[in-house]
Amino acid sequence: MESNTKVQEVDIYDFDKTMIPFDSGSLFWLYCILHYPWILVCLPYQLLGIVLYAFNVYDLTKLKGPFFSFVRMIPKKKAVSKFWDRHEKEVFDWVKRENRERYSVMISASPDFLIDEIAKRIDIDDHISTRHDKHGKVIGKNCHDMEKVKLFRERYPDAKVINVFSDSIKNDKYIFSLAEHCYNTVNGKKIPFDFDSMYRNK
């Protein structure tokens, strides 16, 4: 997508455990096991990926290939739609359209085929996520850590970031660094913190 130089101010939202109370990728996998149990044939491949990740042979980008390999075996569009039919109601009220103060960008490491649908349903202004091909393999890099900043700035090179909301102090240091105001989200609650004080010794 081309860069957007017209947007002046932005709020950034992480997605999993920030806008919703769960990890969407993992829950979607469990949903698919229940509704498409034949995907269990992928389990040995997935377990191998986890082992290679544990021994630092795979990074998160490579791990996601084995983990999401099951998507080639399901009616993906239907499965995603049915999944969000069940879980859309769990989106926290404070992140819904009527409660957002300004232009909002959702940035998530979860797969694009899962995020695209919920982004439309909650009417977020824009969203950035990890791109996957039809076989579940990641295209490019996992949208995580510094990659979030890179992808955001490619699209919004001059935008001023007012607020960043995320459940992960550990993983979202880089995206928090862009904000005037930082909020750690815990069980759906927004907890403000000072960036310099939080990361001074980290």
Image: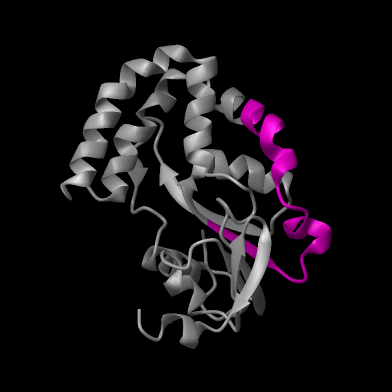
Judge whether 199 appears above or below 75 on screen.
below
Asked whether the viewer can see residue 7, the reply is: no
Q: Residue at x 65, y 43 (%)?
A: 118
The residue lying at 39 percent from left, 37 percent from top is: 133
Percent across and percent down for residue 189 are 68, 62
Picture quarter containing residue 86? top right
Confirm whether the magenta stretch covers residue 110. no
Residue that lies at the very extreme toward the right in this rendered image: 98
Q: Looking at the image, which is closer to me, 74 or 42?
A: 42
On the image, the x and y values in percent for residue 98 come to 84, 59
Residue range (magenta) = 81-107
Q: How far across and down, in percent of the image, does residue 45 sit?
A: 25, 26
How is the rendered protein coloured? Answer: one colour
Q: Is residue 67 left or right of residue 45?
A: right
- The part of the image, by quadrant, that contains residue 143 is bottom left
Above or below, comparing residue 24 to residue 35 in the picture: below
Check the image and report above or below for 79 versus 186.
above
Locate the C terminus by quadrant.
bottom left
Q: Position of residue 59 (x, y in %)?
A: 25, 50
Q: Say whether residue 155 is visible.
A: yes
Q: Is residue 38 left or right of residue 157?
A: left
Q: How many marks?
A: 0
Q: Residue at 54% across / 16% down in the picture?
A: 35
The front one of 10 and 55 is 55
Rendered view: 137 above or below 165: above
- Kindly identify the residue that appears in the image at 51 percent across and 58 percent down: 1
Is residue 14 shown left or right of residue 149?
right
Between residue 196 and residue 177, name the one nearer to us: 196
For residue 92: magenta?
Answer: yes
